[in-house]
């Protein structure tokens, strides 16, 4: 199986890259929930890690940074 990552974890990573801190405040959570609702996504929805890495690279973010974020406990990576 391919490693998978939750949509919520990818958004938390993006927030940390843009803002420079982990997205832990209630305001941050509301912003992420709003973005997911607009995209008709659930924070627990899973996408392939490879797809997340490719999407982030298109945005100019190194895939190694996502993997590092996941390994450092910024989020959880799972196999489904």
Image (cartoon, helix red, strand yellow):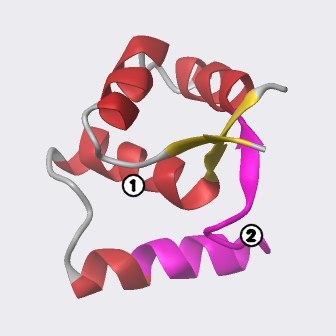
Q: Residues within 10 Å of mark 1 (few under 14, many from 20)?
A: many
Q: Residue at x 15, y 51 (%)?
A: 21
Q: Where in the figure is residue 25, as x and y percent of width and height?
A: 20, 78
Badge 2 marks a residue whose secondary structure is: loop
Q: Is residue 40 magenta?
A: yes
Which type of secondary structure does the marked residue at label 1 adopt?
helix
Residue 9 sits above or below residue 51 on the image: below
Left or right relative to 9: residue 2: right
Q: Identify whether 44 is placed above or below 64.
A: below
The reply, left or right, for residue 66 in relation to residue 2 is: left
Q: Residue furthest left?
A: 21
Residue 6 x, y percent position in the rendering = 61, 53
- Circle on res. 41: 2
Q: Is residue 26 above or below residue 5?
A: below
x%, y% of residue 64? 41, 13
Left or right: residue 15 compared with residue 49: left
Kindly check if marks 1 and 2 are in contact, taking CB atoms under 8 A apart as contact.
no
Residue 32 or 75: which is nearer the viewer?
Answer: 75
Residue 37 image point, x, y percent: 68, 80
Position of 30 compared to 3: left or right?
A: left
> Image point 40% across, 44% down: which residue?
14
Q: Which of 43/60 is in front?
A: 43
Q: In the drawing, what numbered circle is on residue 12? A: 1
The 10 Å Cα crowd at callout 2, few under 14, some 14 to 19, many 20 or more, is: some
**Mark 1 vs mark 2, CA separation in Å:** 14 Å
In the rendered structure, does residue 42 fall within the stretch colored magenta? yes
Q: Residue furthest right?
A: 1
> Which quarter of the figure is the N terminus placed in?
top right
What range of the chain is rendered magenta?
Answer: 31-48
Choose the circle earlier in sequence order: 1 or 2.
1
Residue at image point 78% right, 44% down: 80
> In the figure, 5 relative to 54: above or below?
below
């Amino acid at each position: 199986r391919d490693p998978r990552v939750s949509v919520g974890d990818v958004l938390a990573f993006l927030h940390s890259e843009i803002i420079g801190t982990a997205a832990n405040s209630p305001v941050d959570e509301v912003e992420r929930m709003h973005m997911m609702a607009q995209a008709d996504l659930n924070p627990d929805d899973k996408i392939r890690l490879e797809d997340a890495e490719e999407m982030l690279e298109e945005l100019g973010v190194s895939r190694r940074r996502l993997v590092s974020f996941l390994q450092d406990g910024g989020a959880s990576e799972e196999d489904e």
